[in-house]
Image: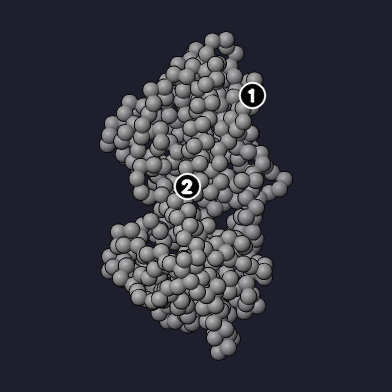
Amino acid sequence: MTAFVLVSGMFTGTHVWQDTAARLTAAGAEAHPVALTGLDGPSTATGPGIDLEAHIADVLAVIDSVAATTDRKIVLVGHDYGIHPALGAADRRADRVERIVYLDSAMPRDGLPPLAAVPDQSLRERLAGDAGDGGALPPPAHDEWGRWGSTAGVPAPALDRLTALAAPQPLGTLLQPLTLTGAVHSVPTTGVLCTGNGTSIEMVQLLVGFGDPALRALVDPRVTFFELATGHWPMLSCPAELTDVLLRAAAGEGHRLAPVDAAEPPPHLRPFLLDVPEAPRERHGNVDLYLPDAEEPRPAVLFVHGGPVPVDARPTPRDWPTLAGYARMAADGGAVGAVVDHRLHDLADYERAAADVAAAVELVRADPRVDADRVALWFFSGGGPITADWLDAPPAWLRCLAATYPILAPLPNWGLSGGTRFHPARAVANAGTLPVVLTRVGREVPEIAATVEEFLAAAEKCGADIEVVDVPHGHHSFETVDPTDESRDAVRRAMRSVLDRVGRPDKA
């Protein structure tokens, strides 16, 4: 006995829900797609009056109409951008909405505009500069939908129709901040994650482990999750499976995240798997140096953490056991170990994070205790996309590039699909003779593992110098979550390979 109120995303209208709505109705539910002002058709008008508040009013009108004609429970479904007007409406009708379904959408925050959820930084900056002119963002061309989310699984005729019926997105809907009273926080929620678009329950659980305050609410038992093995438009690619998930979500089913045990350190703060000797450490701005016992200049290895890491995370990555452990290993092997804290706090931060890494490289190379012509860079996890800068045009002093459980191609929902920057799987074609030491874990998150395989296929095609260090039973962050002999051997092997390539006394 459920009435589903369906709110579509950017550029789209009620037409995207056609198959799903029919299946929900056939299952005995009601389905009410919301016609959003300025979007429900290819030629609807735009103007300065069409903003987020106008779309919230559209959703409220449907909720009130449903509530006036039936006693069914209302489940509010927001896809993509649609979650913003859905949340705004639910905040004002919290007593009428039984559950909110985030359908492959971001997690909007009070006081931020929907534009904040767009990962393309250059687009965000350009649109923010157009505030107040009443314009609209043109819809994607047929071959441009991938910029806004994976089209995996969408049949060709459905993609043709999506393009034909797409409407310009009024800028006011993206630029007006979402304002919430907090009443919506009492409404149970369900996240439906489309794995083909780069998100999974396992990845969300990893992010919760970092301690981001914005994600703490996700371990509430009223919050459930489902996965769909498809791209960003499941109502077009798998309407039957989506219908089943929506009905189950309405019934309160779904996966619940494991709560963070306050008595145990989170995975990234557990002890490093090797007992490495201490080394003198110096702090220079956002870079820590771990110094070997040597008088003459030595090679250096700069370790680059992953992310995104919450801006208020404490301790910061350079004090995490894994990064400090690797840096001490490098110092014990006769090289200068360096760790940089960079500003990858959001998917839109890759440019400034890359700039932080480049500045750290110059700081390390300028130190008189470092042989500036013998340097290695070592990247982890979400820091992997930054390797593209160095693969694309390796400097002569870069003797080795290492990557451990890295992301080596942008995930579809990152908005970084164009060009080679931050796309190592494309940049590796220009790596030349640069040695790459890649540590691959056998129990990797599937979405990340796919990027590694894409990189290796590209590397093989161009004949790049790649050494793969496998940890068959290792998970992401295996240095603190899998302290096994297999894991220890892999860390030692990777370190030996890197130090051999920069040159050092045979001590590791």
x then y, percent, for residue 40: 40, 76
Q: In what element is the residue under mark 1?
A: strand
Residue 138: x %, y % from top left: 37, 64
Please name the residue that numbered disc 1 is placed on: 282
Image point (56%, 41%), residue name: 343
Horizontal and vertical percent position of residue 279: 63, 20
Residue 282 visible in the current orientation: yes
- Around disc 2, counting alpha carbons within 10 Å, would you say few (fewer than 14), some (14 to 19), or many (20 or more)? some
Q: Label 1: how many residues lie within 10 Å, few (<14), some (14-19) or many (20+)?
A: few
Image height of 408 relative to 122, above or below: above
Q: Give the answer, above or below, for where 457 lies relative to 335.
A: below
Q: CA distance from mark 1 to mark 2?
A: 35 Å
Q: Secondary structure at mark 2?
A: loop
Q: Amino acid at mark 1?
A: Glu
196 or 52, nearer to the observer: 52
| Visible residue check, residue 405 | no
Identify the residue at horizontal 60%, vertical 33% (top origin): 286
- Looking at the image, which residue is at 57% across and 10% down? 295
- Residue 94: where, in percent of width, then height? 64, 75
Q: Which mark is residue 482?
A: none
